[in-house]
Amino acid sequence: MIPVLLLAAPAPIPEARKIEALIQAVADLQGAVFIRNGTEHAPKEAADHLRLKWKNAGRRVKTAPEFIQYCASGSSLSGRPYEIRLQDGRTVPARDWLWTELKRMEASR
């Protein structure tokens, strides 16, 4: 008989780790450009900005979906959405890219 513990699904990734993984995924984007308020930023710069927004959000952002919605989708000052120009030249809303990345992370778990 196989112990029940061996059949259990893996424990979910804590939300803070998911958020940090999303930020790191932005930082690791090779050849990409993060566009914020019409200005281009390197992936590492963008990741630093997202980390700062997450820190400033404090307890209001508890989950990865909340992080995407409230910190990583657009400018809280101008209301303009963030975009990512990928290495292949396509420009996508940062929100969409991050949702796809979150789903990929959760599916690989």
Image: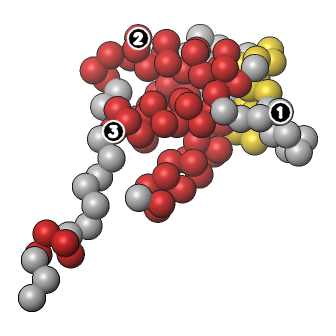
What residue is disc 2 on? 56
**Residue 64 found in image quarter:** top left
Q: Are marks 3 and 1 in contact (CB under 8 Å)?
A: no
Q: Which numbered mark, 2 or 1, is in the foreground of this view?
A: 1
Kindly identify the amino acid type of the residue bearing the numbered disc 3. Glu
Q: Quadrant of the C terminus?
A: bottom left
Colour scheme shown:
secondary structure
Query: How much space separates mark 2 and mark 3, taking CA atoms?
Result: 17 Å
Image: 47 above or below 2 = above
Say which label, 2 or 3, has the lower sequence index. Answer: 3
Mark 2: secondary structure = helix
Residue 60's tag is none
Q: What residue is at 83 percent from the left and 33 percent from the top?
A: 31
What residue is disc 1 on? 31
Say which label, 3 or 1, has the lower sequence index. Answer: 3
Q: What residue is at 49 percent from the left and 12 percent from the top?
A: 52
What residue is disc 3 on? 15
Q: Residue 73, how many percent across, how many down?
A: 58, 31
**Residue 27 found in image quarter:** top right
Image: 26 above or below 46 = below
Q: Residue furthest right?
A: 89
Query: How much space separates mark 2 and mark 1, taking CA atoms?
Result: 28 Å
Kindly identify the amino acid type of the residue bearing the numbered disc 2. Asn
Left or right: residue 45 compared with residue 54: right
Give neighbour class at mark 2: few <14, some 14-19, many 20+ (Cα, 10 Å): few
Kindly identify the amino acid type of the residue bearing the numbered disc 1. Gly
